[in-house]
Image: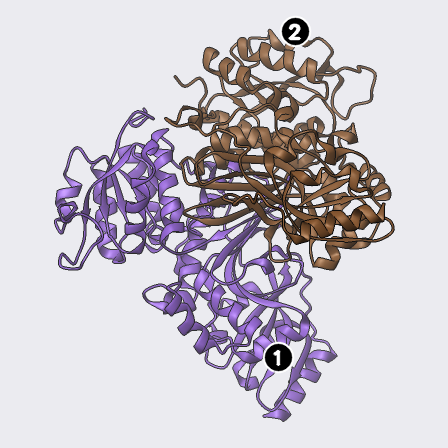
Chain colours: A brown, B purple
Amino acid sequence: MSIYNQQTKLTIGLFGFGVVGESLYKVLACTPTLNAQIKKVCIRHPHKKRNAPADLFTTDVALLLTDPEINVIIELIDDPVAAYYIVTTALSGGKAVVSANKKLIAENMQELIALQQQYNVPFLYEAACCASIPVIRNLEEYYDNELLQGISGIVNGSTNYILTKVTEERTSFITALQQAQTEGFAESDPSLDVNGIDAVNKLSILLTHAYGIIASPSDLLHTGIQNLDENDARFAAEKGYSIKLVATACKLQDGTIAAFVLPQFVGKTSQLATVRNEYNGVVIESSLADQQFFYGKGAGGFPTASAVLSDLSALHYNYRYEYKKLNYQQPASLSGDFYLKVCIRFKSIHQVPHKKFDIILGWSSNSHHCHVTGIIRFSNLAEGYWWKQPGVSVILYPGGIIDNYQAQNDHDDEYYDFVEQLAEVE
Amino acid sequence: MSIYNQQTKLTIGLFGFGVVGESLYKVLACTPTLNAQIKKVCIRHPHKKRNAPADLFTTDVALLLTDPEINVIIELIDDPVAAYYIVTTALSGGKAVVSANKKLIAENMQELIALQQQYNVPFLYEAACCASIPVIRNLEEYYDNELLQGISGIVNGSTNYILTKVTEERTSFITALQQAQTEGFAESDPSLDVNGIDAVNKLSILLTHAYGIIASPSDLLHTGIQNLDENDARFAAEKGYSIKLVATACKLQDGTIAAFVLPQFVGKTSQLATVRNEYNGVVIESSLADQQFFYGKGAGGFPTASAVLSDLSALHYNYRYEYKKLNYQQPASLSGDFYLKVCIRFKSIHQVPHKKFDIILGWSSNSHHCHVTGIIRFSNLAEGYWWKQPGVSVILYPGGIIDNYQAQNDHDDEYYDFVEQLAEVE
């Protein structure tokens, strides 16, 4: 049953009037054809100066959630606990909901899908992944088939800004982070960006729409750029690579899915290499269409508001995510049974459980640090998180997901050479 | 009223079994979740060997169009007259239609929209623009507001392949065209690619979905790469540019729309510069989301079939283009009242009506040809098509659309210098 159509006026209750909320307010004023109007805005701090009429604002959450005239709730706040209450209450009350809250959505996907079905209401969140890039909608509709091979996305603008400054301008990581904060690209808690939490939240959402997999972000292997340093940047430059933090999901030969967030070396011919500064970009591979690439601003007030606006527009034709891939006869599942070609940088060999590597392909060292390139089983990398300790970094090579690697029982000469010589360095 | 839903089996009558038709046939066999099956394929040549069971084929057009079980007609043939009959008859008969025929669609947009409304049936054609790139759907849904500033697209893979070979590998235009034909990127009539006809057909379709403008391709200023030569390639290289054939539509300050297909110089930092060989790419600018970029394969069997597949998937949720922008209170209209900064190459000054230029910004000449850079009113460029004569080329500069140029009544010294000296060259 259609609850909205083109003639239905969208009467909006908006939670949050930060940079995105205010942008949305401004934009709705200049898009009359959308037939949508903000009736009330619920804010936390009533005394803060706002660029909108005072009678638009309230601090009374219930006023919006119980107003029968309000048929759409837009949630753009920073507090995940309050956001959970607002979104679930609104859906249970039969109101359509639009949100940009990736953390809330990723961590509660199962329940939020159930609520949409139970109360037959749309819950749209295009802004939660890559802001202005319509990646969720395209995965849901355009790649609505079994032919999607993989996604590789630069989904966090803040870390991409930092990596761009570090690798192109040789800025230090610390300075680059400060610049990102000054420019307003960082989350209010920048550790969410830097440690890869924001990226893995987005990967979790992408997995649902790409492959019908519901996985808690904390169950997905991930790291950020917190352990990278200038040595990694120099090593990459020597090889002609840049370093990007990439959220990856791809189909293995047996149909299971590899998924993780890791820093990756990116070659000059990759589309991802063109994604600089605060921009986001997603490469989607399908067995039909080869590679496709979507690029745009992944953060900021207006780009995020633009995705919210598009969700509002979609409500007019009663659009909702169907989550069709969850109902496939053979829904996909995550795999730990594949191999990665990685570069590990470390200070002391004791930091690296080298026996876990299947093969050491090369290594180099100086008085400050060592780089070793090897192939390791994904499940071995996921064990213990030894590579998250200070002074150790892990970076994936281009094409570094190896599906059918023939694990070797015997280590070769390069391996013993490596172990022996590094022991001497100690 | 919904005529299809997820449970509805799509029973397909397919017209054409060329490279796209056969790709689609193969792909449907491996996407059972789509719940779609080809019942009959209508072909023109019954004796040609086909990679499918013989009883699938017929030459009887009416057999498909009158079969009550067939609820979707897919039209993938090369003959525009037959395609027109098939598509209009199928729509009038209440069948959903999917087509990839940009020429048919561009030239008959008004009538095809009317038929959809009259018979309440969907007509989808994502494959008609940029094949695998979901640009129509995104313009229709995601950019469903007044904030779309402009589109610049490399929409013809064949000419882009040729330009890539010529500018990067210094291949001659003739050799590059032959290579494109060998590789299968060229239309069956390559002049449609080379002369910009294919690109302007796509621009016409994009205009409808971007701005609600219905314009016949022949009414849109366009050219292809037919007049470019190695001198242009060298000139571009000297300036650090590449040359791309770009379909452009953008909003001017008064809300009217500039639209044309011209070769353009593209700087290294433009996303369009990354679109090489047979790929397509579209930059979409919105006043909210800044620049977005969509990139992918724009031709070929599987990429085109992938867009057709996505249209089939959309039929399951009764998706149809709403053509909402046609019904805006102030629908956009095309403008001739703006200026272009262009480079003209010519042999003799008599080929160039230099008085039509508002200003000459610079020029160079040698014994073989002259290049002149100037600013010209668009309506002056559209008059007479003197720049389509042999030996003359026109290339737009980056940022070369000038909205509010203050036309000068008096020509300056550079202009007289130019006219005088060129007259001497004669």
According to the image, label 1 marks what residue? Answer: B371
Quadrant in which residue A92 is drawn: top right
Depth check: B159 or B24 in front? B24
Q: Position of residue A354 (x, y in %)?
A: 70, 41
Instruction: Report the number of numbered marks.
Output: 2
Check the image and report above or below for A4 versus A238: above
Q: Residue at x 53, y 33 (%)?
A: A136
Which chain's residue wears label 1?
B
Say whether mark 1 and mark 2 are on the same chain.
no
Q: Amino acid at mark 1?
A: His
The answer to whether residue B159 shows anywhere in this view is yes
| C-alpha span from label 2 to label 1 | 69 Å
Depth check: A98 or A238 in front? A238
What quarter of the picture does the C terminus of chain A occupy? top right
Determine the secondary structure under disc 2: helix
According to the image, label 2 marks what residue? Answer: A62
The answer to whether residue B286 shows anywhere in this view is no
Q: Which mark is residue B132?
A: none
Which chain's residue wears label 2?
A
User: Of discs 2 and 1, which sits in the foreground?
Assistant: 2
Q: Position of residue B81 (x, y in %)?
A: 23, 56
Q: Residue at x 78, y 51 (%)?
A: A421
Depth check: B243 or B387 in front? B243
Q: Position of residue B322 (x, y in %)?
A: 41, 35
Label 2: few (<14), some or many (≥20) within 10 Å?
few
Residues at discs 2 and 1 in contact (Cβ within 8 Å): no
What quarter of the picture does the N terminus of chain A occupy? top left
